[in-house]
Image (tube, grey):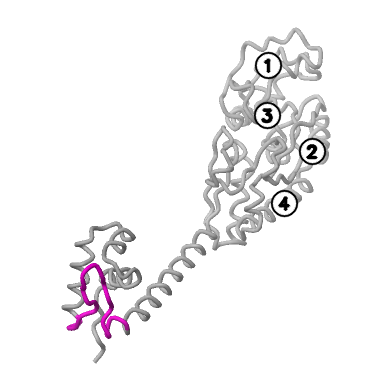
Amino acid sequence: MPIRLPPLEALRYFEAAARHLSFTLAADELCVSQSAVSQKVIQLEDRLGYKLFERRTRQLVLTGPGTQLYPAVHSALGLLSETLSDIDTRSQQSKLTVYCMPSFANRWLMPRLHDFHSKHPHIALHLIAEFAEPNFHNEIVDIGICHGTAEQPAMEQHLLFSDYIYPVISPALLEQVDLREPGDLRRTVLLHDSLPHAKLATSWQSWLTERGVRHVDCSGGYRFNQADLIVGAALNGRGVALGRHVLVAAEVARGRLVPLFNDVVEDDGVYAVFLKKLANRPQVKAFCSWLQEQALEFQHQQSVERIIGSAQTLAVAH
């Protein structure tokens, strides 16, 4: 008949007291009172039916059974602690926290994430989509996908692809308005970013000024605080958007948005950013490799030259 083992907590108290040969030091380690350790050991001795310690004046000495039991309990608890730690480490390795801007998440990343999950089902991905870039040094975020970067010695930065800015309009609205040059924008509604200095933001005022167009009123139109909402408004024919290629490329490729004036301006690149000390984490390496694959596929299938050229040909034919 198997021996009924004593409670694990009682063995933990015994192991600490035996290792220190002191109830006081064991209590300090376990963050309990000295009497709690003493009582727990007495309960263990009563359960086992023999003494584990000799309580001498200012001295604690293991008995014969105590001496025999201590190395087994110490080894077992150590093995249990190591195993739990290893399991916890492996569990942490399967988690990945990724940061990007909300509009980038909706328009570019989310449609592709099913592919990452199919290839790495063991990695639990947590996506943080916020306007403000995080402090990567607190390690809450493993990888960031950022527009433009600044050199930081502790960070690795891998360029995924360049981004571009150009005006886009829905085919239905284009049928209603004759737009042959930027000055013709006075005949339609402009879709503005209400946070012109935020990442992914675009500015009609700056774009028109750089082209010497002064008679288009930028005070009217609709304003949105997210680039994704601007793209949505353009798709619904609410006006002309100054779009980012990374956000509108898929819609231009499908013919749901049409670029205007054959005017494309290169802007900041899109980078994968992470702390150098995290570079060898398996989930970080896996996601970075996958990101680079997706970036290459994006550049091949939806390069600005390819889809803008095709869209312009379609618009002229229309």
Q: Quadrant of the C terminus?
A: top right
Circle 2 crowding by C-alpha within 10 Å: few under 14, some 14–19, many from 20: many
Locate residue 168: give its quadrant. Answer: top right
Identity of the residue drawn at 73% across and 16% down: 185
Q: Quadrant of the N terminus?
A: bottom left
What residue is pinned by disc 1? Answer: 188
Upstream in the sequence, badge 4 or badge 2? 4
296 or 30, nearer to the observer:
30
In front: label 3 or label 4: 4
Q: Say which element carries label 3.
A: loop
Upstream in the sequence, badge 4 or badge 1? 1
- Please give the range of residues in magenta: 48-67
What residue is pinned by disc 4? Answer: 292
Residue 226 colored in magenta in the image: no
In front: label 4 or label 1: 4
Examine the rendered structure and indicate whether residue 280 appears above or below residue 80.
above
Spatial CA span between label 2 and label 3: 18 Å
What residue is pinned by disc 3? Answer: 170
Spatial CA span between label 2 and label 1: 25 Å
